[in-house]
Image (cartoon, coloured by chain):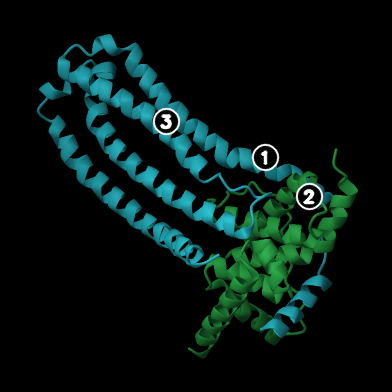
Amino acid sequence: MQNTDAFVALIKENQGLIYKVTKLYTNSKEDAEDLYQDIVYQLWKSLGTFRNESKISTWIYRIALNASITHLRKEKRKGSQLAVTEELLNKEDTKDNLQEEQFETMYAYLKKLNEVEKGIIFLYLEGKSYDEIAAITGFTASNVGTRLSRIKQKISADIKK
Amino acid sequence: MKTLWAEMSAAVEKQKKITDSIIIKMTRSNYRNKINKIRVPEFIGSFLCMAGAALIVFNFRQLTTWYLAACGIVACLVLVLLSFLSVMAIRSLQRINITDNNYRESLLAYAKGRLQFVRIQKINFCLAALLMVTILPVIGELINGQDVFKKPGVWLWYAVLFPFFYWVSAWVLHKYLKIINDAETILKELGNDG
């Protein structure tokens, strides 16, 4: 029997992270709800396998990103998910419309990247070090650096268009 | 962009609203969704194919001419193969080990799974065309007791159905092109370096 209270606390603590991943990897509210649930479910299912060899945050990022990959291949679900839209997917608490627009524009640029690039830039933006990104993604730290500079160039070129 | 991301993260943190009961519900309902989503269509598809094959086997004696018997055998084999392939197609998409894989391994498994899925779907289409040719005389004999090869109008059916089938196949295969391209892009990206 897993510790439900500890799990609930873990999800509450990391709900912002889950929200950001779902928004980055989906294009509709329905898909986002679906992925959000999937990540929570996968975390629940995998909780027993977590060994204290890595940080819990590293483990959560890994599961969340892996769940996002598996989500890419699924067809859209047909209304069987929980009706929790309002609770789960409220927009960011923005200061004004301009800020909200800036966030949306940023996501739009990030969503244009391919799946390899998306995962790496997400972790970078989350403030992870090259070593942490390497631990989560399986690339070497030097490779992460190379890829990041390529991604930055790609985004810059896209913004200048 | 990093500053903007930090601002967005702060805004998201302010908005935390999820409740304990919703989290607990999510650990339960998602499991049920998965069963509905993947297992049921897989099961229904395979069951229908196997039921069709069984129907032909149990009524094989009614296929009295050599050509009807040949159609029956081919249709039966195709139905069994289709049943097997529908399970294979689903399994090719289920190989990602979310718990143990890192992101790179998951992407590799995902891209390879997609390519395998498309390969299987292409085989499915060829088999479906073969099934269409062979099942019509078998059904005609088993359900109506008529040898369609002796009826002049039957070729009209083929004449109508084949262009339609060709059009559907071309449309579906075109749709798969994007999947193939995306998967190959990922494999190429991952193959560049560690």
Residue A78: image location, x then y, percent: 58, 48
Closer-to-camera residue (B29/B70) = B70
Residue B39: image location, x then y, percent: 56, 36
Amino acid type at circle 1 is: Arg
Query: Circle 3 sits in a helix, a strand or a loop, which is it?
Result: helix
Residue A81: image location, x then y, percent: 67, 49
Closer-to-camera residue (A124/B57) = A124
The residue beneath circle 1 is: B32
Could you give the CA–CA distance between mark 2 and mark 1, rounded to whole angstroms?
24 Å
Q: Which of marks 2 and 1 is in front?
A: 2
The first of marks 3 and 1 along the sequence is: 1
Placement of B188 over or under B95, stated as above or below: below
Q: Do labels 3 and 2 share a chain?
A: no
Mark seen at residue A16:
none
Amino acid type at circle 3 is: Ser
Chain B: what color?
A: cyan
Q: Residue furthest right?
A: A5
Q: Which residue lies furthest to the bottom in this view?
A: A160
Q: Which of marks 3 and 1 is in front?
A: 3
The residue beneath circle 2 is: A50
Which chain is rendered green in the image?
A
Q: Are marks 2 and 1 on the same chain?
A: no
Image quadrant occupied by the N terminus of chain A: top right
What residue appears at the point 83 percent right and 53 percent down from the top-left corner?
A52
Amino acid type at circle 2 is: Phe
The disc numbered 3 marks a residue on which chain? B
Residue B160: image location, x then y, percent: 19, 41
Q: Nearer the viewer, mark 3 or mark 2?
A: 2
Query: Circle 2 sits in a helix, a strand or a loop, which is it?
Result: loop
The disc numbered 2 marks a residue on which chain? A
Query: Circle 1 sits in a helix, a strand or a loop, which is it?
Result: helix
